Image (cartoon, helix red, strand yellow):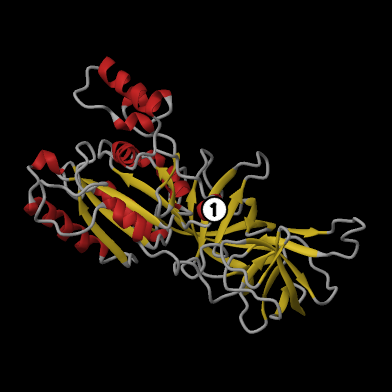
Amino acid sequence: MEKEEFDNEKYMNMELLRFTTAGSVDDGKSTLIGRLLYDSKSIFEDQYEAIKKSSEAKGEEHINLALLTDGLKDEIEQGITIDVAYRYFATPKRKFIIADTPGHIQYTRNMVTGASTANLAIILVDARHGVVEQTCRHAFIASLLKIPHVIICINKMDLVDYSQEVYDKVKTDFKNFSSKLEVTDVRFIPISALKGDNVVKRSENMDWFDGPTLMYQLENVHIASDRNYVDCRFPVQNVIRPMSDKFHDFRGYGGRVAGGIFKPGDKVTILPSGLTSTIKTIELYDKKLEKAYPPMSVTITLEDDVDVSRGDMIVRDDNQPEATQDIEIMVCWLNDKPLVLNGLYAIKHTSKEARCKIVAIKYKVDVNTLHRMEDDKAVGKNDIARISIRTTHPLFIDKYRRNRNTGSIIIIDEGTNNTVGAGMII
């Protein structure tokens, strides 16, 4: 049989879905990802043979598909996920990037890191244990990060005799809890990652479930409208001046579209100067585009020779972000050194860099119960808290719920240059 010719252009234009997995320890996250990769034929034969031999050497009854993702020595020895494991695969319909995040409470920061850019979150629930504290914690973080779509996979259905009653109870319990959260699109699928039921292939053991498989959901969930296409935001990352004979007078502004749709001829304002101009061209490599939208990286040229620098933002005249130095954020603290009240930190917001002072710590959030802890304001690693900061320069912000790009801030320790906090503007 003649090998089908690879269509590179079609492949490059395929839609990309980023999704994250979360759940308690031993809920089967890594096994599920291994099953997705194996059943969708996204692993090589030698990889399969390697994990088959490893499983046989350990005396395991089944081929341990979790070995496809557990890469660290401690992960393999303990049978748990510690770091965020990123995996990539593709089907004829879509490309996928998976962030397999750890379940332990001491790795909350890793989950926040893996989920921050996700379109969808898969939260696994052990059918034998039902909704537990960590299920609630992961759902809260998915809500906090405004992940648009959540799939609750009730796993290990083979260990409860594929009981519909067990599935219905988990579904009811989670719905009762999630009613407190801002999660709009929640779907439920009963699966067995170990046996493959309802992962890629429909389960013959659960004919009572008439919904689609997990793979069908991943391939068909509508994500095109998840981004903000209303508020035009273009943070300038660099000024492009080729200084060559061919492009002697060329002056363009490179960056990634953070929101809205830009077109040649649009009237725009440059912040913070407030100068106005008109978009002359939008370019990508050697092509001139008719429009640009998130998350495209393009070069914009203007009709007028105005002063534009890295960190500036190009917006529409009639739709501008808030310019402020006093900002309230929900922060997930990532560092061993605790957050210091009145401490000075460097920050990065889109392409703009500045410094800030921690003005107030309002409260911490108990991520298991969602209760506010107003008496305990010691913010350490993996804690989530509401804080107020004052920046050295005005930032051009939107609320995180409106735009995840212009609504997020990274906090950096100036002494070590380590990223110590991830903030969501509220």
Direction bottom: furthest residue: 318
Q: Is residue 30 left or right of residue 239?
A: left
Kindly indicate the quadrant of the structure image that contains residue 272. Answer: bottom right
Which residue sits furthest top? Answer: 57
**Can the viewer see residue 382?**
no
Residue placed most toward the observer, 208 or 322: 208
Identify the residue at horizontal 67%, vertical 62% (top origin). Answer: 298
Q: Nearer the viewer, residue 360 or 382?
A: 382
Residue 79, placed above or below residue 119: above
Q: Amino acid at mark 1?
A: Met
Q: Is residue 123 visible?
A: yes
Give the residue displayed 19% in from the left and 63% down from the top. Answer: 176
- Reply above or below: 414 against 299: above
Q: Residue placed at 19% from the left, 42% from the top?
A: 192
Position above or below: 325 against 375: below
Image x and y of residue 19, in percent = 40, 51
Tell me: 307 left or right of 191: right
Badge 1: residue crowd in 10 Å (few <14, some 14–19, many ≥20): few
Q: Quadrant of residue 278?
A: bottom right
Q: Residue drawn at (42%, 62%), measured in percent from left and top? A: 146
